[in-house]
Amino acid sequence: MAGSFKIDPAEISKILGTIDGPVGRYLSERATRLQLAAKKQIARGNGGWSSEGNRTRNLSDHVVKRPTVTDGVVSVLVGVWGVPYASYVHTGRPGFKKPTVGSKKVFVFQAKGVTIFTRKVGPQAPNRFLADNLKLVVEE
């Protein structure tokens, strides 16, 4: 006895293409793992970036996940939003750098409540807080 079934595109779309569907919830849970692990690694200061530099928690507070649906495909993006120096922390800073903006001759920044003026800054080891934790997305 042969059976038949009907494919309902609307139901498939609800399952696969909505953030509230089972696929969207699964992706969101995996993205949350990555987000929390990245925040934790930033706080620990792995990769040579000291946890002391994380006193403001600005970088870790801006690690976000953004669920989205594009052309019926649900996805969840994890990254840093609104912190322009995030890529320097993640990829490191090779070699020595001198100011390149306008006519500035020195870098000015604060460390331990003291204003520091310097003509160049040294290399900084990377803290790959996102890349290091991608394994949490694919592992059980």
Image (cartoon, grey):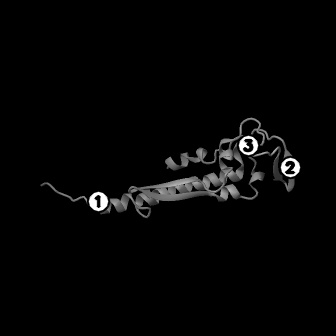
Query: Which residue is pictured at 62% across the width and 52% down the height?
Result: 38
Q: Nearer the viewer, mark 3 or mark 1?
A: 1
From the viewer's perspective, is 112 left or right of 132? right
* The one of 95 and 60 positioned closer to us in this rendering: 95
Q: Quadrant of residue 63?
A: bottom right
Determine the CA span between mark 3 and mark 2: 20 Å
* The one of 33 and 120 positioned closer to us in this rendering: 120
Query: Which residue is pictured at 67% across the width and 52% down the height?
Result: 84
Give how far across and how far down residue 129 sits, in percent: 63, 48
Q: Earlier in the sequence, mark 3 or mark 1?
A: 1
Query: Which residue is pictured at 59% across the width and 44% down the height?
Result: 131
Please give the label number shown on residue 48. 3
Look at the numbered disc 3 and give the secondary structure of its residue: helix
From the viewer's perspective, is 40 left or right of 140? right
**Amino acid type indicated by mark 3:** Gly
**Visible in this render: residue 139?**
no
* Residue receiving disc 1: 9
User: Residue reaching furthest top?
Assistant: 95
Look at the numbered disc 2 and give the secondary structure of its residue: strand
**Visible in this render: residue 2?**
yes
Q: Nearer the viewer, mark 1 or mark 2?
A: 2
